[in-house]
Image (tube, helix red, strand yellow):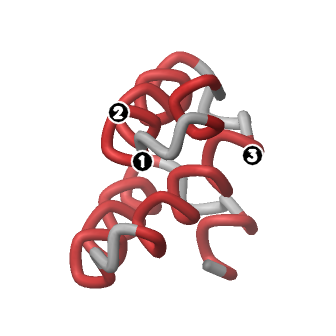
Amino acid sequence: MEYLFLDQFENAKINFMKCLESDTEDYSALYNIIYCFEYLNENEEAITYLNLFLDKNPYSEVACIN
């Protein structure tokens, strides 16, 4: 969260991804990853990431909605 507060969105995104790797139900991390992608204007990368996440967690409602 500190990276997010410091507007270091690339570092924040990477660390939120690590959080999500250890706990796939950490929906706040998933929301924050999407926020970082959006702020960095990385829409295609966000779609790719969410598709990969959904391949591993097909019943994730939060990922489907985003």
Q: Earlier in the sequence, mark 2 or mark 3?
A: 2
**Helix, strand or loop under label 1:** helix
Percent position of residue 48, x then y:
25, 70
Q: Quadrant of the C terminus?
A: bottom right
- Cα–Cα gap, marks 2 and 3: 18 Å
**Helix, strand or loop under label 2:** helix
CB atoms at circles 1 and 2 under 8 Å apart? yes
Percent position of residue 38, x then y:
46, 75
Q: Amino acid at mark 3?
A: Tyr
Q: Which of the 4 image quadrants contains residue 49?
A: bottom left
Along the line of sight, which residue is nearer the eye, 19 or 41? 41
For disc 1, the neighbor class at 10 Å (few under 14, some 14 to 19, many from 20) is: many
For disc 3, the neighbor class at 10 Å (few under 14, some 14 to 19, many from 20) is: some
Residue ID at (23%, 82%): 44
Q: Amino acid at mark 1?
A: Phe
Percent position of residue 3, x then y:
51, 30
Image side of residue 28 versus residue 14, left or right: right
Residue ID at (48%, 58%): 36
Q: Which residue is mark 3?
A: 27
Q: Which of the 4 image quadrants contains residue 64?
A: bottom right
- Cα–Cα gap, marks 1 and 2: 5 Å
Q: Which residue is mark 1?
A: 9
- Cα–Cα gap, marks 1 and 3: 18 Å
Q: Which residue is mark 2?
A: 11
Percent position of residue 6, x then y:
55, 35
Q: Amino acid at mark 2?
A: Asn
